[in-house]
Amino acid sequence: LQRPYRENVVLEAENLSLGHAYKNVTFQLHAGEILGIAGVIGSGREELTRTLAGFAPHDSGILRVDGQSVKLTTPAKAVDLGLGYIPRERRVEGLVLFLPVAANITLADLATLTRNGLINSREERRIAEGWVERLRIKTPTINTLCLNLSGGNQQKVCVARALEMRPKLLLVGEPTRGIDVGAKRVVLERLIAANREDGTTLVVASSELAELRMVCDRIAVIAE
């Protein structure tokens, strides 16, 4: 079972709008909650998620993070506020395909791995091997290029990197898109575990309503 979420609001949207993508979206997200955003492609679901990740700043309305009004103009600003992101298009936005598994997993955590301009390769290896084991990532070695992994294992690498950041709020776009049944189960179980064990707050956007019902505390439906 997921942890019961708490009363404090970590993210709040009030009449949030972006061009013709979505209009007047209002919701509150509580600490430790898993909120689902359901909708078909073209409903505005994906654009809303990208707004929260800093890729598509909203035109009007108010967005608050921990009670502070913000406009997320870049992904870096979202990361600075503790927002992690697993994109729908993992091969385009989620991975550096010509880097190895280990580098992709630790890419967002280089500050803690680097000293005097050099990466601590032993620590990088330890972190990567830990995630390979936890997520059952099928790869010959952690030095294998992500380009050579199956779609399901590429998605697991995306999940590993996002969770390694230890975000206070994780945004997930179509977490099981294009992966096999076994990989779907592992990815969903790991997201639930992050919520249960670490209290990670999650926003999961998907067209798969059955999957959202499996993992979410509440589901918001976005349409037209």
Image (cartoon, grey):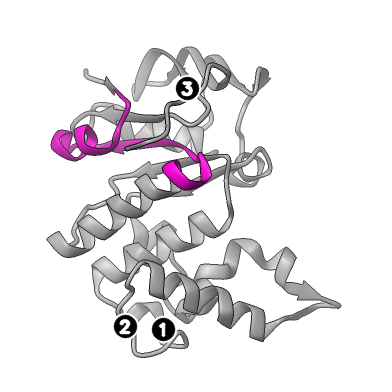
Q: What element carries label 3?
A: strand
- The residue sitting at the right extreme is 116
Q: Distance between the residues labelled 3 and 1?
A: 37 Å
**Three-letter amino acid code at disc 3?**
Leu
Q: Is any atom of residue 180 visible in this view?
A: no
Question: Vertically, is 166 above or below 148?
Answer: above
Question: Vertically, is 9 above or below 73?
Answer: above
**Three-letter amino acid code at disc 2?**
Asn
Percent position (x, y) of residue 175? 29, 49
Q: Is any atom of residue 65 visible in this view?
A: yes
Q: Which residue is rendered at x = 42% and y = 27% of the image?
A: 4
Q: In which quarter of the image is the C terminus?
A: top left
Contact between labelled residues 1 and 2, with CB atoms less than 8 Å apart: yes
Percent position (x, y) of residue 91? 35, 64
Residue 200 inside the magenta-drawn segment = yes
User: Are there few (<14), some (14-19), or many (20+) residues within 10 Å of tag 3?
Assistant: many
- Which residue was labeled with disc 3? 29
Q: 217 or 47, which is in the foreground? A: 217
- Which residue was labeled with disc 2? 148
Q: Distance between the residues labelled 2 and 1?
A: 6 Å
Percent position (x, y) of residue 3? 42, 33
